[in-house]
Amino acid sequence: MNARSGRKECVFVQIEQVYPDEKNPAAEFSFEELRARNRGWFDPEWISKMETEKAQRAAHQVNSRLSQTRQILGARNVQPQTLPAQLVPVGD
């Protein structure tokens, strides 16, 4: 019975999809999992993919800002400074 409408409800499913392993009947997918698989959301690596995309966006922003900074410094004719080969410790 559908809780909203009160009407009788029938669900049709491919039993092979719900129980993919014939030898292990305990291995089963819920309807939500099957729906997620069908929509491409059931990939266990989706978090790492999101993290990779986030890192790529951050790297793009950093490169963009670095490029802008180089353009500004180039327009002002500012030369980057280099550090000496050996750094001397200050105050012990």
Image: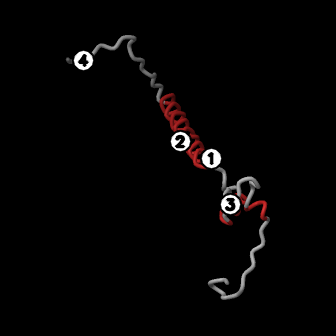
Quarter of the rendering occupied by the N terminus: bottom right
The picture places residue 8, in percent across and down from the top left corner, at 72, 85
**Would you place residue 87 above or below residue 55 in this image?**
above
- Between 45 and 69, the residue placed more toward the observer is 45
Q: Please tell me in which quadrant of the rendered image residue 49 appears.
A: top right
Alpha-carbon distance for marks 3 and 2? 37 Å
Residue drawn 46% across the image and 22% down it: 79
- Numbered label attached to residue 90: 4
Residue nearest the observer in this picture, 22 or 90: 22
Labels 3 and 4: the sequence-earlier one: 3
Residue 58's label in the rendered image is 2
Please tell me which residue is depicted at 74% across the width and 53% down the height of the picture.
23
Q: Amino acid at mark 2?
A: Ala
Dot 4 crowding, Cα within 10 Å, few <14, some 14–19, many 20+: few
Q: Which mark is first along the chain, 2 or 3?
A: 3
Label 2 sits on a secondary structure element that is: helix
Residue at 75% x, 75% y: name it: 11
Are the two marked residues, 2 and 4, in contact with CB atoms closer than 8 angstroms?
Answer: no
Q: Quadrant of the C terminus?
A: top left
Disc 4 marks a residue whose amino acid type is: Val
Give the secondary structure at mark 3. Answer: loop
Going by the numbered disc 1, the residue's amino acid type is Glu
Q: Secondary structure at mark 1?
A: loop
Q: Between label 4 and label 1, give the one nearer the viewer.
A: 1
Instruction: Give the CA distance from mark 4 to mark 1.
Output: 48 Å
Instruction: Identify the residue under disc 1.
Output: 45
Tell me the tag on residue 29. Answer: 3
